[in-house]
Amino acid sequence: MAQGLCPGGREVELFNEYYFRPLRERAGVPEDFINSWSIDGLSAGGGKGGTLMARLDNFIVKELSKGDHQTLLRITESFSEHLRTGKSLLSPIFLHFRDKATKRTFFAMRNCVGQGPFKALYDLKGCADDKTLEKDGIVIPAVHKRIWNVAMWSSCCWSSARRRYHRGKVEARKAQLFVTSTQKDSVLEALRRDVSYLAGQRLMDYSLLVAIKDLKDEGTIGLPSGQPFIRQTKDGPVAVHIAIIDFLQRWTMGKRVARAIKVFEKNKATIPPRAYAARFAVHFTQQVVAVEEEFADFKVNGLMALSPKGPEEPLPDFHLEKAEEPLTFHPVPVESVARLEEPRVNSLREDNKTAEINNIEAISRALEGWNCT
């Protein structure tokens, strides 16, 4: 184990330090960055799977399922190369370990949005699963409409919590990210590069985490590493953090079954990786909006890139933990995603916009021919 690295003061087994240690060094992450973490401080992260996590200011420790553990083992080499060789919105992962006492596995990643309260915090997939996590400093708990819950079939029977959650979902589907035209090009270039990589690894169901924070009372002091986009508004400076998270879900037989069960759902998240990547890219090409330069004052780049800092140094000689299955990597050409054009939207009727976005399903079906079913 690296000197000074002792997660939570516990005895742990490290995976693929050959790749993660250089990522920490490039990002300036100290070796003791999660030593203060406590396994007893884990709490539900709020997702459907109920994943446990702990927040430590600039970092997050998250428990891994068996499947996600295997996925991370499988993609670590290509993931580290992806972060080192270009701009990326992927939330950087800096450590992968197993607690020897409990046999539970975890990873530590950057907290890309910092601490609240937030004006708005969105979890966006470019489909019907979009949701608002926090609005004006108030956390919005998820209240799902399940088919077995008869009381949820009609909106007239919804609780106030369900109505608030539904309003947040409607808002999230329409959420726009305002940047300058130059930064829009940079963001979309990074996003398309990322989804091309994720599709090549047969990964899907990831989200764009967007946090909007009012800075007029505190300025930019204390913002997390990987600074956000900052723009001036009539009410003062606003920071917009953007990161791709939850990207360890593989397209498996279980996902195929879930897709069949949800056959009557519209614009669902459970679609094959290349179709998911295409829809993701098309949706955010629409929703990332350029504003006039004179109305914005952006001071930092905001991309979560670990760009090269000169000649590569030899990597330390660590034991490489192998996945149960051999690594297979079939990159999807960035051009295949980049050439997708924005669907035209009739400004006379808002309903047409929803219809156009739903029509991306047609693009998705066409792209399923890329050996992804």
Image (tube, grey):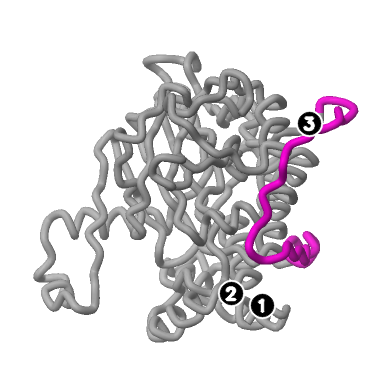
Name the quadrant containing residue 60: top left
Query: Which residue in the protein does label 3 denote?
Result: 316
Query: Which residue in the protein does label 1 denote?
Result: 372
> Cα distance, mark 1 to mark 3?
36 Å
For the residue pair 14 and 192, the one nearer the viewer reads as: 14
Name the quadrant containing residue 162: bottom left
10 Å neighbourhood of mark 1: few (<14), some, or many (≥20)? Answer: some
Looking at the picture, which amino acid does disc 2 mark? Answer: Pro
Give, as a single range, the part of the protein colored magenta: 309-338
The label number, if any, that marks residue 272 in the structure image: 2
Give the vertical position of 53 relative to 234 (above or below): below
Name the N-terminal-most of marks 2 and 3.
Answer: 2
The picture places residue 277, in percent across and down from the top left corner, at 63, 64
The label number, if any, that marks residue 44 in the structure image: none
Does the CB distance between marks 1 and 2 fall below 8 Å?
yes
Question: Is disc 3 placed on a helix, strand or loop?
Answer: loop
Name the residue: 48% across, 26% down: 34
10 Å neighbourhood of mark 3: few (<14), some, or many (≥20)? Answer: few
User: Would residue 314 appear left or right of 226 to someone viewing this image?
Assistant: right
